[in-house]
């Protein structure tokens, strides 16, 4: 029961603010061809998390937030102008860590498809949690336990 409560606490964590000094100052630009060719953010939008893949091109997916009149709009953006769908985009309050992980979990490129991340793992023939977490890393100053939620997700889907 205690372990369940700890996991629940991770999901309920909500930062005080999304925009400020604690966040990434700017999108990094590449020194080498490592895949960090993300579109520039506009002044109203800020990266709140990024998913880094240890692929041959070092692909990066950016989770970005924008303050709106009714709350916060979240967008998932990569270097290839992929259209990610099937995730919640609008929140009336700052999303919790669990809600941000749900965006990462639910995002997909095709409707009615299995989880995007299961497809990535299968495509790269990753068999263990260690292989998966060596390949997929979620980085965020605002939501520090997203990788723990990633491990929980893959554990719940049969990976050890």
Image (cartoon, grey):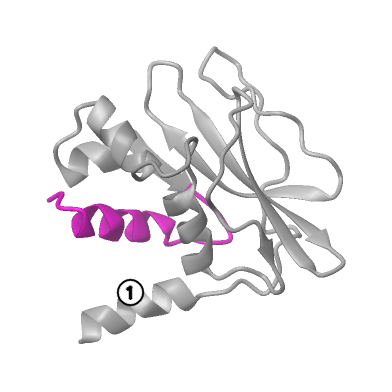
Residue at figure coordinates x 35%, y 41% from the top left: 117
Residue sitting farthest toward the bottom: 1
Q: Where is residue 97 in the image (x, y as percent from the top left)?
A: 50, 66
List the residue tagged with mark 1. Answer: 7
Q: How many labels does the image show?
A: 1
Q: Which of 8 and 20 is in front in this view?
A: 8
Residue at figure coordinates x 12%, y 51% from the top left: 160
Q: Is 140 a magenta residue? A: yes
- Quarter of the N terminus within the rendering: bottom left
Q: Is 94 a magenta residue? A: no
Q: Position of residue 28 (x, y in %)?
A: 65, 31
Q: Position of residue 92 (x, y in %)?
A: 72, 73
Residue at figure coordinates x 53%, y 49% from the top left: 86
Residue sitting farthest toward the top: 33
Q: Is residue 67 left or right of residue 84?
A: right
Q: In this view, does 115 lie to the left or right of 43?
A: left
Q: Height in image: 23 above or below 112?
A: below
Q: Height in image: 10 above or below 116?
A: below
Residue at figure coordinates x 61%, y 68% from the top left: 95
Splitting the image into 4 quarters, where does residue 30 fall? top right
Q: Where is residue 139 in the image (x, y as percent from the top left)?
A: 49, 47
> Under tag 1, what secondary structure?
helix
Splitting the image into 4 quarters, where does residue 74 fall? bottom right
Q: Residues within 10 Å of mark 1 (few under 14, many from 20)?
A: some
Q: Height in image: 56 above or below 9?
A: above
Splitting the image into 4 quarters, where does residue 3 fall? bottom left
Q: Which residues fall within the magenta stretch?
A: 139-160
Q: Height in image: 117 above or below 23?
A: above
């Amino acid at each position: 029961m205690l372990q369940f409560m700890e996991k629940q606490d991770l999901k309920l964590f909500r930062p005080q603010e999304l925009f400020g000094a604690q966040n990434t100052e700017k999108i990094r630009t590449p020194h080498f061809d490592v895949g960090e060719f993300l579109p520039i953010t506009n002044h109203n939008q800020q990266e709140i998390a990024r998913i880094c893949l240890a692929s041959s091109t070092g692909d990066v997916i950016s989770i970005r937030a924008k303050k709106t009149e009714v709350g916060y709009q979240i967008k998932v953006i990569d270097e290839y102008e992929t259209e990610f769908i099937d995730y919640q985009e609008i929140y009336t309050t700052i999303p919790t860590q669990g809600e941000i992980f749900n965006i990462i979990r639910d995002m997909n490129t095709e409707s009615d498809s299995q989880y995007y991340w299961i497809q990535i793992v299968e495509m790269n023939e990753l068999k263990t949690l260690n292989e998966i977490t060596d390949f997929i890393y979620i980085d965020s100053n605002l939501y520090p336990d997203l990788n723990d939620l990633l491990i929980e997700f893959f554990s719940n889907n049969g990976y050890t």
